[in-house]
């Protein structure tokens, strides 16, 4: 069947169309019996700590990636040992919403099975690293006992749905926040493979029959009504924002949903489509893109509209080239008008034009704040989302003891921090006492504005895609930049700072007013000019800089900014006005 958008390519529809060997991932999905593959037998294999490539593709749908410790690669090669394989598990947490008991479970799991720490991601999820192959099933069972799962944490499906987590940001927050869970549950894969393989779910829900069921089931017995046998061409991301706050960088999502409010009542949502940040060095046909506003929908229309958008991507996304497989490329290939027409045809009704909205910031609001229900909320700084106990900072222990009090819930932010919510006035002192006990600040007022607004992906030593350091390096780089800020009177200025170890976008580098993307060990491309509000991409400023060159450029740029900015002008706006870079108006302009 020919693709109407590109006749030179075969269109791989979601049900029944014979696929070719276009990509190994598509073949693995086709042969994988709705995400089962040979995972049961693979994880019973005691000979190796790794799994076959075909199963690694399917395992992602279960929320897990195979990794190895890259710090040990050379030494292990010299000793003729296989790499130090382990697994990362990404917990699905819509809106980043956790009970105190769930936080305690995460803490315990990281100690028993992981690296004794865990990572808060830029999508309000949690990642465990260092899980060995033979502990993976027990880890997932421990998560299930705490009512947590990693279904669709990764893979070619809709992933964790984000939402502004802070009840003090808007009086209608309670009306909007539940939609993150509604959308997440609505778009979950229907295959029971996860429950059969990891939780021993058998026929009729009986335990202990998982292996028997997996080996005997036929594809016809399990149907994915939305995704089909081949699922999506690539990952799909959704986020919800409540103006004026844009802490989740809403326009970086395949579908960005913006709450529209009138007289403190939720009226509906703007829908934006086609966001995504990943690109590939040297391939200008790959680029980051911000989502485009296309419609306004009423709350009762939201689930249907989002589902139809997913369906279009399922049917028309490129399955022959994974670097071109995201919705952003589908839209740019077919044209936005064609996409909108197709959406209306599938819905059977027209959609209203998007409403005007204004965002003021994409930063987190640290410290104590009171909501309209008289409950208190405390937003705590977690450097690059790594919850850990290290010399001089026992933050993981402090948060564990706060969870043991049982006086609050935990919510993760899209900027890798943690928000303690629903605290009674009388319980504030107990929380403060725990921070004081460990010599920690309950907020981030003692930190520079640059450090408060910094994000870094995991990168080395576990991410197989990383070309350079990010999380392990950025804190020390900020320490070296802070004297430049100090001498220019900028130490408290809010400047968005991002670093990733590769161009795949996990740390949203191209959304930083200052962004670094690793090119090789110790060298980075520097990007400038995104907006503080999260509605403009940055642009390449300088390539392949080492630390000495980075510090020289930061001195030049920050000194110029301090001396010549207009009142209230953000750094990202200034570098465009001063001519350091041109504004990126759309994704197709990114490489200009």
Image: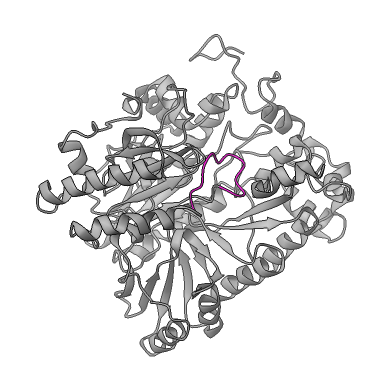
Q: Residue furthest front?
A: 548
- 574, above or below 108, in the image: above
Magenta stretch: dominant secondary structure: loop
| Magenta highlight on residue 111 | no
Instruction: Please provide percent x and percent y for residue 592.
Output: 31, 23
Instruction: Please provide percent x and percent y for residue 147.
Output: 64, 66
Q: Which residues are magenta?
A: 460-471
Nearer-the-camera pick, 537 or 327: 537
- 87, above or below 138, in the image: above
Please state, as top left, top right, bottom left or bottom right, where the N terminus lies in the image.
top right
* Residue 354 image-quadrant placement: top left
- 386, above or below 161, in the image: below
Nearer-the-camera pick, 383 or 30: 383
Q: Residue at x 78, y 45 (%)?
A: 50
Instruction: Please provide percent x and percent y for residue 124.
Output: 48, 57
Q: Is residue 167 left or right of residue 55?
A: left
Q: Residue at x 59, y 71 (%)?
A: 102
């Amino acid at each position: 069947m020919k693709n109407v958008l590109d006749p030179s390519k075969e269109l791989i529809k979601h049900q029944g169309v014979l696929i070719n060997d276009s990509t190994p991932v598509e073949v693995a999905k086709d042969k994988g019996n709705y995400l089962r593959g040979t995972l049961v037998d693979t994880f019973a294999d005691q000979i190796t700590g790794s799994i076959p490539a075909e199963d690694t593709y399917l395992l992602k749908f279960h929320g897990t990636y195979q990794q190895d410790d890259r710090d040990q690669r050379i030494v292990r090669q010299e000793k003729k040992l296989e790499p130090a394989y382990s697994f990362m598990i990404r917990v699905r947490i819509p809106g980043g919403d956790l009970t105190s008991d769930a936080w305690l479970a995460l803490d315990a799991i990281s100690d028993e099975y992981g690296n004794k720490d865990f990572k808060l991601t830029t999508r309000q999820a949690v990642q465990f690293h260092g899980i060995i192959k033979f502990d993976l099933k027990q880890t997932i069972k421990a998560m299930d006992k705490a009512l947590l799962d990693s279904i669709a944490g990764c893979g070619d499906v809709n992933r964790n749905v984000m939402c502004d987590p802070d009840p003090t940001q808007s009086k209608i927050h309670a009306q909007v926040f539940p939609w993150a869970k509604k959308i997440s549950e609505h778009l979950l894969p229907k295959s029971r493979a996860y429950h059969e393989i990891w939780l021993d779910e058998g026929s009729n829900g009986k335990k202990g029959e998982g292996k028997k069921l997996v080996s005997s089931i036929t594809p016809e017995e399990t149907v994915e009504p939305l995704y089909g046998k081949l699922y999506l061409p690539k990952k799909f991301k959704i986020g919800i924002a409540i103006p004026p706050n844009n802490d989740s960088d809403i326009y970086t999502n395949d579908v960005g949903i913006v709450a529209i409010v009138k007289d403190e009542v939720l009226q509906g949502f703007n829908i934006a489509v086609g966001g995504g940040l990943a690109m590939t060095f040297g391939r200008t046909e790959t680029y980051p893109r911000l989502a485009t506003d296309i419609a306004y929908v009423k709350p009762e229309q939201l689930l249907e509209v989002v589902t139809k958008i997913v369906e279009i991507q399922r049917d028309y996304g490129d399955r022959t080239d994974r670097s071109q497989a995201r919705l952003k490329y589908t839209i740019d290939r077919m044209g936005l008008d064609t996409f909108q027409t197709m959406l209306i045809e599938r819905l059977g009704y027209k959609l209203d034009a998007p409403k005007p909205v204004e965002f003021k910031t994409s930063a987190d609001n640290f410290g104590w704040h009171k909501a309209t229900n008289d409950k208190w909320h405390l937003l705590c700084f977690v450097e690059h989302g790594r919850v850990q106990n290290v010399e001089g900072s026992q933050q993981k222990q402090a948060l564990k003891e706060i969870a043991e009090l049982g006086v609050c819930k935990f919510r993760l932010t899209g900027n890798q921090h943690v928000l303690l919510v629903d605290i009674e006035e009388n319980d504030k002192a107990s929380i403060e006492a725990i921070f004081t006990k460990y010599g920690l600040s309950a907020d981030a007022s003692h930190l520079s504005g640059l450090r408060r607004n910094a994000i870094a992906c995991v990168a080395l030593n576990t991410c197989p895609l990383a070309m350079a350091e990010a999380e392990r390096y950025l804190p020390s780089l900020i320490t070296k930049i802070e004297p430049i800020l100090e001498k220019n009177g900028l130490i408290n200025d809010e400047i968005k700072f991002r670093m990733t170890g590769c161009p795949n976008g996990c740390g949203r580098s191209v959304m930083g007013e200052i962004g670094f993307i690793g090119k090789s060990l110790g060298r980075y491309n520097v990007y400038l000019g995104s907006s503080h509000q999260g509605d403009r991409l940055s642009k390449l400023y300088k390539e392949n800089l080492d630390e000495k060159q980075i510090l020289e450029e930061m001195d030049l740029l920050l000194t110029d900014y301090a001396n010549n900015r207009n009142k209230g002008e953000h750094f990202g706006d200034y570098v465009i006005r001063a001519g350091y870079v041109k504004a990126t108006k759309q994704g197709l302009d990114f490489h200009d």
